[in-house]
Image (cartoon, coloured by chain):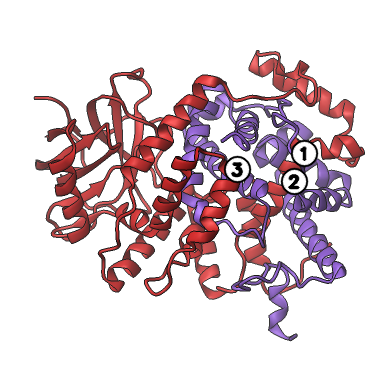
Amino acid sequence: MTVSHPHDRVLELLADQTTEGLTLEDSNELDRLLMEHPDLDDEELERVAAALLVAELSGEFTAHGRLDGLSAAKSQQESAVAGDMRGDGSADMPAHMPAHMPAELRARIVDNGQRWLRAHPPVPLLRSRSENSSARENERRRAAMDTSGGGARAPIEDFRSTSDAPPPIARIGDWRSAALGWSAAAAAMVVAALAWWPSFAASRSAGQGIVGGLAERRATLMASAPDLVRWGWQRVDNPQTSATVAGDIIFSSAEQSGYMLIEGLVPNDPTALQYQLWIFDESRDDRFPVDGGVFDVPAGGGPTIVPIEAKLSVRKPVLFAITVEPPGGVVVSERKIAMIAKPE
Amino acid sequence: MERFGGLVWSVARRYCPSASDAEDAVQEIFIDLWKSAGRFDASIASETTFVAMIARRRLIDRTRRRARRPEAAMIVETIVVPSEPMGERAEISEDARLAAAAMAQLRPEQQRVLQLSIFHGASHEQISRSTGMPLGTVKTHARRGLIRIRELLEESKSTAGGSPSGSGDGSRTTTGAAPRDGGAA
């Protein structure tokens, strides 16, 4: 089979993205190509892969004996090798043993959901159209960077929530209630929160100097959160850290929300390195701090406000650390720390 | 949660090297789902496919980030193939059924590469090591196999009488159908 149309390279990149993710270079190339061809559905191959995975998990292939590529013997052999490596005997599992999520994990996710909803209530958009546009672009870049390919390139375009068009509230509601099966109250909150997603998406971008939205939100959180911690930054010897640092970090565990006010980090080239926040939680092993999000410090000087996006629920922070990481951040940091914040 | 918890957990267990890693991944996936829910469009894909797509993205992202660290790369040395399907044998959606039928039409080597990649989250390099195929061949099979499935799905939709890639708001065309815009239509 030969692909012979003008979008060969786009298809190649989309296929690579779907099966393995892209390098930063390829991701940038794909971004450029997609901008030249806004008519393309850049998620289609991902949907194909997802549909195949669902079919496999549902036993569709086994039930119909459909595939030749991985014979039963071959599959068993590879499973056995993998099972040996895992040391968990998983290779002996019958093909369709039910896999139920551990109850503790389920409870944690429900807890995360409730915290997330509390942290992102439905608030009206306050930004001007130009601010929205700029924020979407920033978020789009961050998303492409953040995922190095597998991830969320499309989401920003797909929100389709230009300042002229209301978010698809009804559709979200239909899906939420039908699909995720939260309690009615939680579902309603999710619908409301998601309806204002553009507001949340925009807030993730760092703002420099006086940025109305972020500064206001930071002030609001400081005024309203009863459990707020507020610690000043302390300098750590690092080439990315200026001689003097200033600013602070605020965080509310109840709201699962917080902001960094940073002065003293060297503006970064996002293609070379990025900053990443780590949150050390009293309830977690120090070896596994919570990822607080990747961010950039734009050139121009002055304080930068960055909203915190904790990837997991934080119960009681005991220390915050900013590290210097490769573009996109990492799952486990080598801890090239640039700044820390902790109780005095 | 009730409906898709098993799916997300099953996928995470397949793509993650350990149960604890899968637990963290599942939490991230659900946060992504909450954020991305507004993008779901029933005219394009089923809910199950949408959830699986978001889950795969996050897991691939995690795998890539993990692989950037040398020690992590060593841990993920071999393809992990646990067989953990969804909890209560999920109902299979039409798009999944059609995709399965299309995959069955691929050449065996393409099927094999896509199975290891999509069903088990193996990297191209891992597949190459596991199967003995050159890395370039693995990439080619993955690309061509996936693109071929998409083409077959387009054909089946056309045969069924519907316009390719659904109609709905018709805001975007499909990757494969669109290129014909160079001349046709």
Q: Is residue A118 left or right of residue A18?
A: left
What colour is chain A?
red
Percent x, y of residue A296: 29, 51
Q: Residues within 10 Å of mark 1 (few under 14, many from 20)?
A: many
Q: Amino acid at mark 1?
A: Glu
Q: Are marks 1 and 3 in contact (CB under 8 Å)?
A: no
Residue on which the image places disc 3: B56
Q: Amino acid at mark 2?
A: Leu
Relative to A195, say whether A343 is above or below.
above
Q: Who's purple, chain-wise?
A: B
Q: Check residue A56 in the rendering and tell me which mark sits there, or answer none.
A: 1
Name the subunit of mark 1: A
Res B162 → quadrant:
bottom right
Residue with the most extreme front position: A184
Residue A276 percent location from the top left of the image: 31, 40
| Residue A246 falls left or right of residue A206 | left
Q: Which residue is mark 2?
A: A52
Residue at (82, 45) in percent of width and height: B111
Measure the alpha-carbon separation of dots 2 and 3: 12 Å
- Look at label 3 and name its amino acid: Arg
Tell me whether circle 1 and circle 2 mark residues in contact (CB < 8 Å).
yes
